[in-house]
Every structure is written in C-alpha cells, then in structure tokens.
Amino acid sequence: MTPPGAERKARRAAGAALDKRAADLVVLDVRGISTVTDYFLVCTGRSTTHVETIADAIRDALRVDGIRPLHAEGVAASGWILLDYGDVLAHVFLEDTRAYYALERLWGDAPVVEVDRA
C-alpha cells in the first residue's frame, strides 16, 4: 500500500478531527516557509477528554493507511497533544493553551488549506 501524500494525509486527519467535533480547525500549508513539516493541523477540544478523543481519532484514521506517528508529545491534561507524522504535524489544544501558543499567528504567512466541513 502506498502511503498518501502529505496534503491527503492532512485532509484525512482533519476529517477525523471534524468527525469528533473539533472546534476552529485549520490546516496550514507551511511548505514554502518551514523546513520542519509541510502541513500544520491545528484544532481545539472543549475538554481534556475531548482533546484525547480527537487525537485518538486522528491516529485511528491514519492507521487505516498504515501510517503511524513518528512521535507523539503531550497529554490532554497539559492542554496540548502533538502528533508528528513527519510531513504533517497535528496539534490538538484546549482553548486557553491554543490562545497562549497562537500557532496561527506565528505561521500567519502560511496559506490555509480549505477542508470540507461535511
């Protein structure tokens, strides 16, 4: 099985997060401004349980394609879970933690990838 491209991977992760009602989801295309990754997915959960549920849904959705995170960091109780898929970094935040780190402002020059919100 050929793994999906980075954008498709980001879209699949976004879909999984939206299926679990992630709030304020944004996918940033940072290929032209970062050497760290190609896409940032940033979203918010309403509680620590919700943050964990969203992160688990992303892991499960990508596992279907045989893709596992290269690295995972944080726990829901800290307000931030990071799933590192190499070319896609998925950040699942609690609202206050997301506001504090303001990744969208930090990467404000990055184009936003439109994601279907079915």
Image (spheres, rainbow, N blue to C red):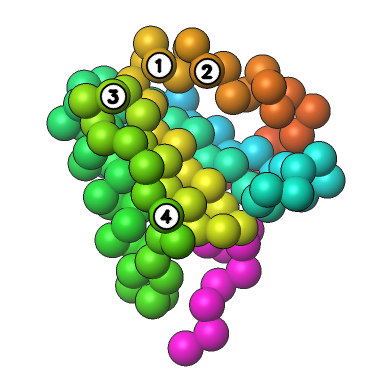
Which callout, 1 or 3, points at the residue further toward the start of the chain?
A: 3
Q: Nearer the viewer, mark 4 or mark 2?
A: 4
Question: Is residue 79 shown left or right of residue 106?
Answer: left
Which callout, 4 or 1, points at the residue further toward the start of the chain?
A: 4
What range of the chain is rendered magenta? Answer: 1-15
* Secondary structure under the numbered disc 2 in the rendered image: helix
Q: Which residue carries the number 1 mark?
A: 97
Q: Residues within 10 Å of mark 2 (few under 14, many from 20)?
A: few
Question: Is residue 21 shown left or right of residue 34?
Answer: left
Rounded to the nearest angstrom, the CA distance separating label 1 from label 3 is: 8 Å
* Tag 2: amino acid: Tyr
Q: Is residue 16 above or below residue 21?
A: below
* Tag 1: amino acid: Thr
**Residue depicted at 26% across the width and 35% down the height:** 75
Q: Which residue carries the number 3 mark?
A: 78
Q: Residues within 10 Å of mark 4 (few under 14, many from 20)?
A: few
For residue 71, which numbered disc appears in the image?
Answer: 4
Say if mark 4 contacts mark 2, CB within 8 Å: no
Query: Residue 9's spot in the image, x, y percent?
Result: 52, 61
The front one of 25 and 38 is: 38
Query: Residue 40's spot in the image, x, y percent?
Result: 58, 42
* Tag 3: amino acid: Ser
Q: Which residue carries the number 2 mark?
A: 101
Rounded to the nearest angstrom, the CA distance separating label 3 from label 4 is: 17 Å
